[in-house]
Each structure stands twice: as structure tokens, then as C-alpha cells.
Amino acid sequence: MCGIVGILGNHEVAPQLVEALKRLEYRGYDSAGIATVNDAGTLDRRRAVGKLVNLSDRLVHEPLTGRAGIGHTRWATHGPATEGNAHPHRHGPVAVVHNGIIENFRDLRADLAQAGITPQTDTDTETVALLTGHHMAQGMCPVEAARATLARLHGAFALAFLFDGDGDLMIAARKGSPLAVGHGEGEMFVGSDAIALAPFTDRITYLEDGDHAIITRAGVEIYDAQGRRANRDMVRIDVGATAIDKGGYRHFMAKEIAEQPAVLGDVLNHYVKNGRIVLPESVSFADVDRVLLVGCGTAHLAGHVAKYWFEQIAGLPCDIDIASEFRYREPPLSDRSWAIFVSQSGETADTLAALHYAQGKVAKTLGVVNVGTSAIARESDIALPTLAGIEVCVASSKAFTCQLAVLAVLALKAAADRGRIDAAALAAHLDDLRAIPGLLNQALAVADDCRALAGWLSEAQDVLYLGRGALYPVALEGALKLKELSYIHAEGYASGELKHGPIALIDRNVPVVVLAPRDTLFEKTVSNMQEVMARHGKVLLISDADGITEAGEGTRATLTMPMGGGAFQPILYAVPMQYLAYYTAVAKGTDVDQPRNLAKSVTVE
Ligand code: F6R
């Protein structure tokens, strides 16, 4: 979480810093701030609580000049969202922006106290500025001072330092958190990701763990964790692919939901060609005895859906785990198993740590990742892109369905490699999968009905979601989406589990959303739905036309989904989950694209 940016430029840097921060706001929006060194060499800063727009307003009335600067958008970890806790933090001639957590900041504070230096903020980051300023006061030059500080830091960080009196020096460092260096014409940049730098340059060097960089307008010198000069490749990014606009939609989320037929089409064109699965040659499940799927939040739920596919279609035992639990539980892992890490950002701290835990213990690690340059993509044995394109809304929609599509392809490959299905059965499954983009297009038509239901849902205190089989994790995803977007309490349950406790919650004020396509589990789910209605529960039944005809009577409302999709129907049923949450949030007037307290890239544990 938190986004950082730094620019040694040839133009007034404040507007550029704000433009870059706009692209990093998905990392947090508790406060924002910038510091610049003006042409007289004076370091100054402006900070504001809340969204970036508050900082922009402030800069209109209290402008900052200068062609060198650093900026930050905060997701609060240590200390509340106040101006005092906002970055950049400054001590004497040093200003610092930081993404990550300095775990030993209390020890560092104790050392600083002995030198008579007292912190002014609640943050861990301030100790970096205090320590560096202290080193400079003892006579070190900026580079020596920053190096001496970096040597003392424990934890995770991406840092950028700026110095009073030197408008042509910026120091950047990373450990655990990502950091990109951008190369311009006589200008240099750093940013938490390349997307932030896309308005300025397409030439990027990614720092590796433990690296620090001494940056001037003339270029960059990179040093590795041992302090040796290091060569890191420069890559060109596709700036066109970094375009961020709402395309005429009111919110990014609406745009991203509507993009699903197209992006799912792209995913399937990439992984299925002429009726054959196309995956790297090393993806063969013939000798694999178990698959482990790990992720957080929605990405974890994608793994949960895929568990049903791996077990039912491929007959391959499959465990799923939440990354934050997996990494500390020390689960024994078989060296014939594969571990698959699912992540949109590819930077989620817990998922990355889970990958590190599995390395060397399992036969292979796979990353199913949307951001191709991310740590999980780079560090997995095999990285499979989910090709959803940039997802801006903090709540995941198209990234989820693209994850499902890639996992579906993997499960079918496993089934074929293990001889669980013959060529005809594989072809039938692939036909079902290839039909998904078209069916998604039809599924988008539920938008109007979801909008009409939003008034009802927005008045509820609690909402329950029920599903069975592979629709159970989709019910969990529906509840997660509603919670995070509309702040209404919601829970997902396996339909059969309801009578073991949660049914006590049912009364006429609790909407119950039932996911029940007309499949082999339909009768069972409908029985559970009847149990709800017998207790005056108000049901929203989501099914296909046959299911609605058969069981729609007596419900409060129904949503009709397209038929088809075979085993891959969960991908379709994600759409009403997304639209119900989206329109309920719109009805409640919450911030759809940037819900409170959340950040899109969760780089702290
Ligand atoms: C929910 C949501 C989160 C993420 C989770 C993992 O809508 O977006 O639950 O799925 O934070 O993030 P990634 O996929 O980047 O690892």
C-alpha cells in the first residue's frame, strides 16, 4: 500500500507529481503530499488529509515550485490519517516518502532519543528521515547518510529521498516493496509502478530486492544489497496499455464489469487455439499429486471456485488457502505438488510471502497474475498472465473472472494430462469455456434489474448469499463485494450449512440472495431456499429461465441468467454479484471506485 513517486525533471514538477499520484491513488487515499526543491535549492512540502484532490486544492492556494520533487499517497498503517502523519516526512535537510513498514522503528527511535532527537509523528517512516538527517548533521554527505540509514532498516520498504540544497539528487531504495526507475531525456523518475510513470517515459528499470539507486538527471547508478554496482535491464513498457480513463462510464467499476466479455475473449484466445490448450511446455500435470491454490480476498475465492474444477474434472486433490494463514501455519508440502498463487496485483505481501514459503518445497510454483511485471509474476517458476488489462476500481471484477478463466484452462489441462477425460470430453469442456464470453455479454443484461433491486438492498442491515458447489465461493464473492462497496454487512454460506446456525438470522428484513442454476444441485439449493421463505425470509433467486420457472414463485425477486457454460457457470454468476454490489453502493452514495479503508495493492501484511 501507499504509492511513491519522484522526479528530477526539466519542468515545474508539482503538477507532474500530482498526475503520477493520481495513477497511484489505488494504493491508498488516506492522505497525500509532495516535497520539492526549488531553483534556489530550498526544500519545502505540502500535505493534505484525504483524497489527492485535497492536495491539489491546497497547491492552488499554496503552490510549490521546483523541478525536483517526491510525492506520496498514503494508506495509513502507523498513526491516523492526519496532516502530521502524511508523507513526505522531513528532518533537517532530508525529505522521505515510503511504502512498506519499518519494523524496527521503535528501536531506531530509542537510539535517536539518546541523541536528543524526538519524533514529531506517529509514523514508522519518520524515523528514516530522522536517522538520515542525524547522519548528515554528523557530517555525512546525502549518499553516505542514506546508505547508513538503509543499513539499519528492517521490514519492507520502497523509499525515495530528496535533499535541501541539491535539486539534482534523489536516492531510491527497495526491499520487499516494488520500485521502478524511469529514464527520460535529461530527466529521471521513480515510482511504485511503471503505470505511474507512463505519462513521462516508457523506459523502465525495475529495482531488485535490496537495491538502492543514486539518481541524477544524467542517469542512475544502481547498487545491490551487498553494495556492489549492479546492472539492471531497461525494458520498454507499452504506454498504450496503461491508459486510464472511464470510457464514458460513471465509475471505473461499471467500465470494468462491462469489459468482461472482451477481456475473457482475449484470455481464451491466448490459452485455447484451434480447440487445443496452449500453455508453456513445462505445464504438465502428469506427475502432480496435489494442487495448492493460495491468494487473498477475491483472488482466494477464484482459487476456491477452481478447487471444484481441479477435483471434479481433473480428479486432482486440491487444497485452498488464504495466504496470510498459509504463510505462518507451516503446512507440510509434498514435493510432487504444485502451488498456484493467484493475484491481480502480483504484489500482495502475504501471497508473495506464501510463494517464498513454497519455493523449494513443491515441485513447481505458478503465478496466475494480472500485472506481468510484478514480484509474483517474476518470482514464480511459471507466470500465467490473466490479461484483464489495468483494473482501476479497488474492488476486483474483471480480474476475478479472468483468473477463473485461466484456472479453468489449467484444470482442463490437468484433466487431460492425467487421463481423466478423453478428447471428446475435453472438446466439450473447451466448447463450454469458449461460449463464456458470449454468455457474459448476455449476462450483462441483468444490470437494469440489479439497479432496480438496489433500493431494497441498500436499506438492509444484513444480506445473506447462498450457493452450493462451485457457486458457493461465488456467493462468498457476492457478500465480499457488497461489504466492501456498500458497507452493508453481508455473509456468504454454503446453502446446506444454513440450518446449522445462520438460519437464526432470517427474518423479513434480511434479503437472501440465492444462486441456483438449473444443474444437478438445483433441487437441493431450492429446498434450502424454501426453508428461508418458510421463515419469512425475502429471497432474490438468481437462476436461468428453467430454474426461475420452476422455483421463482414466492420469491421477492428473480434475476434471469443465460443458460450454458457447463462447469464454468460460476464465471457468469460473478456478474450479478458485481452489479448488485455496484448499484447498491451507487444507491447509498458510497465511493464505488475507492471504498473507505481499502487499497488495491496490499503490500503490507
Ligand atoms: C476485493 C479485492 C481484494 C483483492 C485482494 C488480493 O474486491 O479486490 O480482496 O482480491 O486484496 O489482491 P491481489 O489480487 O492483488 O493479490
Image (cartoon, helix red, strand yellow):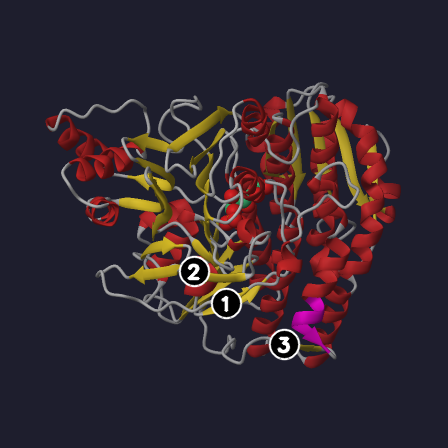
For marks 1 and 3, the one nearer the N-term is 1
Q: Kindly identify the residue that appears in the image at 55 percent across and 43 percent down.
A: 16
What is the quadrant of residue 536 in the picture?
A: top right
Q: Is residue 93 above or below residue 265?
A: above
Q: Amino acid at mark 2?
A: Tyr
Q: Amino acid at mark 1?
A: Val
User: Which mark identifies residue 206?
Assistant: 2
Q: Secondary structure at mark 3?
A: loop
Q: Whole-Å distance between the Cαs marked 1 and 3?
A: 26 Å
Start and end of the magenta stretch? Answer: 268-273
Q: Kindly identify the residue that appears in the image at 57 percent across and 57 percent down.
A: 370
Q: Whole-Å distance between the Cαs marked 3 and 2?
A: 29 Å
Tally the numbered discs: 3
Instruction: Work out whether residue 520 can be spotted.
Output: no
Circle 3 is placed at which residue position?
Answer: 278
User: Which mark identifies residue 235?
Assistant: 1
Q: Amino acid at mark 3?
A: Val
Q: Secondary structure at mark 2?
A: strand
Q: Is residue 270 magenta?
A: yes
Q: Is residue 73 left or right of residue 212?
A: right
Report if the CB atoms under discs 2 and 1 are less than 8 Å apart.
Answer: yes
Between label 3 and label 2, give the one nearer the viewer: 2
Instruction: Work out whether residue 365 can be spotted.
Output: yes
- Residue 133 placement (x, y as % from top left): 23, 35
Between 461 and 231, the residue placed more toward the observer is 231
Q: Kindly identify the residue that appears in the image at 33 percent across and 37 percent down.
A: 164
Q: Whole-Å distance between the Cαs marked 2 and 1?
A: 8 Å
